[in-house]
Image (cartoon, coloured by chain):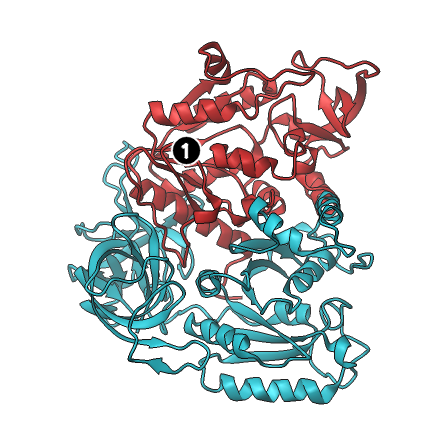
Amino acid sequence: MSSQTTDIQIQTNDQYLNMDLLRFTTAGSVDDGKSTLIGRLLFDSKAIFEDQLDAVERASSNAGDENLNLALLTDGLRDEREQGITIDVAYRYFATPKRKFIIADTPGHTQYTRNMVTGASTANLAIVLVDARHGVVEQTCRHAFIASLLRIQHLILCVNKMDLIAYEQSQFEKIQSDFSEFSSKLDIPDIHYIPISALKGDNVVHKSENMPWYEGASLLYTLENVQISSDNNLVDSRFPVQRVIRPQSDQFHDYRGYAGRIAGGVFKPGDEVIVLPSGLTSKITSIETINGKLEEAFPPMSVSMTLEDDIDTTRGDMIAKPDNQPNVGQDIDLMVCWLNEKKLAPRGKYAIKHTTKDARCIVKEVKYKVNINTLHRIEDDLEIGLNDIGRISIRTTSPLLYDSYKINRTTGSVILIDEFTNETVGAGMII
Amino acid sequence: MKYSLTHLQQLESEAIFIMREVASQFEKPVLLFSGGKDSIVMVRLAQKAFWPAKIPFPLMHIDTGHNFPETIEFRDRLVEELGAKLIVRYVQDSIDQGKAVEEKGPNPSRNGLQTITLLDAIEELKFDAAFGGARRDEEKARAKERFFSHRDEFGQWDPRNQRPELWNLFNGKKTLGEHFRVFPLSNWTEMDVWQYIAAENLEIPKIYFSHQREVVKRDGVLLAKSEFITLLEGEHYEERQIRFRTVGDMTCTGSVESPATTIEAIIQEVASAKVTERGARADDKRSEAAMEDRKKQGYF
């Protein structure tokens, strides 16, 4: 890695306070250069410090590597360093004057699906890497499918190692057209294609002079400018009640605040609301934080609301608008990704978590499994084990107040928990 | 931009959500408080999460006895202002009871010993969740840490066998005797913490700001003069203009030379820093996996 030149200036306070946040996940097969790419982004944005670099240099030479092994920056555990593998999602942080970035760096080898699903569940954007020499391979399709399944709205296909194919335009265009054909079967509205060399720095931070035929933006520029503000659902108002706040002090004698995080839509004082599952209606008196009253609240704000009427409301209830309510039901279909070595048990009972509500459920039926490389349905083998994705029907012990995951990631997602080990075993997306 | 939050607002909202989850999912949470900047931010977030009610859990300080006096003064004043409940447990008591043994050497660190006192206190007071202010950007073993981090009945962390954490769904289920460590600041960086302190106008202990102090340079770390440090041959104290980037045990918390006397000046310094804040911590320099090993045993 050459010496790090950076055009990122020290941020003034005002700039820093106006930055927004982009969470992205990175996926690639082994040796696609993912670590090098992340290393490059961290270096060029000055997120790596001298002592971290020293530690990596020391560790690289201990391991007999001639080159700086940037994977050592992300492999945080002793087992990982010793075995040269990454076993878990690692989170990395960097910032430019425009945005702060959170990278969920998911390993390419073992337990791939489980880790990528975890990293993708909170991501706005996915970077999928392909090797320019090999083009779109099975793993590329798998990564794109998972991004689409988890409803990531933005995908950047980085065609890496362009330097090894002499920056050849025709090969890039072939990869672009191959991927575009595959991704037409998916549900990702915003796809970008960028030819890069992470090692040489082409089109990573700066536009490359080696590819004058490429008219698009560099990777960093794209990351900085992708529009994510419209990704939140601002139409369907949803407020899962997390906790009831009752100070019982002299100053706030009768205060009853409903605390939670807005999951969808916009709430304002004076709005007519319905509290579910009771179905009682009231009006919002105020939306408050310690810093004062708010004129409106929207996702993903954590607030506290007071209502005009004293309605019996507890954790697990949902506040919505009378003319736009979530589904209420106990019989629910899910796409589930299995996260545990112990297979999903047909007719098995699990604890389920959905928004702020806890319940139990029974698996009524496994409908099909998905071949995540071809997207074909498998109907003759319905065993769902670690890293498998399939469609199941469940019945819950009490009604859930839910939306389709396609409409709302917060009110459309559940986790399944093994009641004996307490482990999180399944990630479910409501259909 | 309408209907979008800045990154600091998003981090704040996430941390408040986590705190409310813990208060609802657990019976007896506690907030581990060191008097350092991260725990000061934690206390502010807890105040916001439950306002206008009081913070519904106590604060607990594991006191090594090697504190900067400025930190203890600050701690006591903050607790009084908040009307919060503070529990203090002393490493010295664990040593006196024979549960912990003081390290030998010229700067015996009580950093590792804190784990013993901490786990004893969690068991004695039956806490089932303990909030920590640790951040994933601090150290590479921490980069794999969960928001809700499960600890077995011995208080141990098993990094290879962590529960996957998806969306905003946090699984705090456990069996009797186990507990959770919870890290609401997981996604914050050092810069975010400083910016938040500036934005919220929070008071912090004086040792974070530039001052004159006698220090000794040992293994590249500038350690403050104190009764807990024995000078080695050839070493001597000298007066320098320094400040501390973290607040820990006096025996292992190194200072940096700095003229920064305001939060704004500190922020400028952090923005142009070339070494991580833990780079000045002698406790992390002990080995490549020092933090991982301590964490597995039940460290903060």
- Between B251 and B241, the one lying in front of the other is B251
Quadrant in which the N terminus of chain B is drawn: bottom right
* Figure quadrant of residue A65: bottom right
What chain is colored cyan?
Answer: A
**Residue at point 46%, 44% (across, down):** B184
- Between B257 and B262, the one lying in front of the other is B257
Residue A136 position in % (x across, y down) = 58, 81
Q: Residues within 10 Å of mark 1 (few under 14, many from 20)?
A: many
Residue B99 position in % (x across, y down) = 46, 16
Specify whether residue A66 is in view.
Answer: yes
What chain is colored red?
Answer: B
Residue A369 position in % (x across, y down) = 33, 75
Residue kind at label 1, given as amino acid type = Gly
**Residue at point 78%, 26% (across, down):** B241
Specify whether residue A404 is in view.
Answer: no
Q: Is residue B201 left or right of residue B17?
A: right
* Figure quadrant of residue B70: top right
Q: Is residue B157 left or right of residue A96?
A: left
Q: Identify the element where label 1 is drawn.
A: loop
**Residue at point 45%, 60% (across, down):** A118
Q: Which residue is mark 1?
A: B155
- Between B114 and B55, the one lying in front of the other is B114
Q: Label 1 is found on which chain of the structure?
A: B
| Up-down relation of residue B298 to residue A341 (above or below) | above
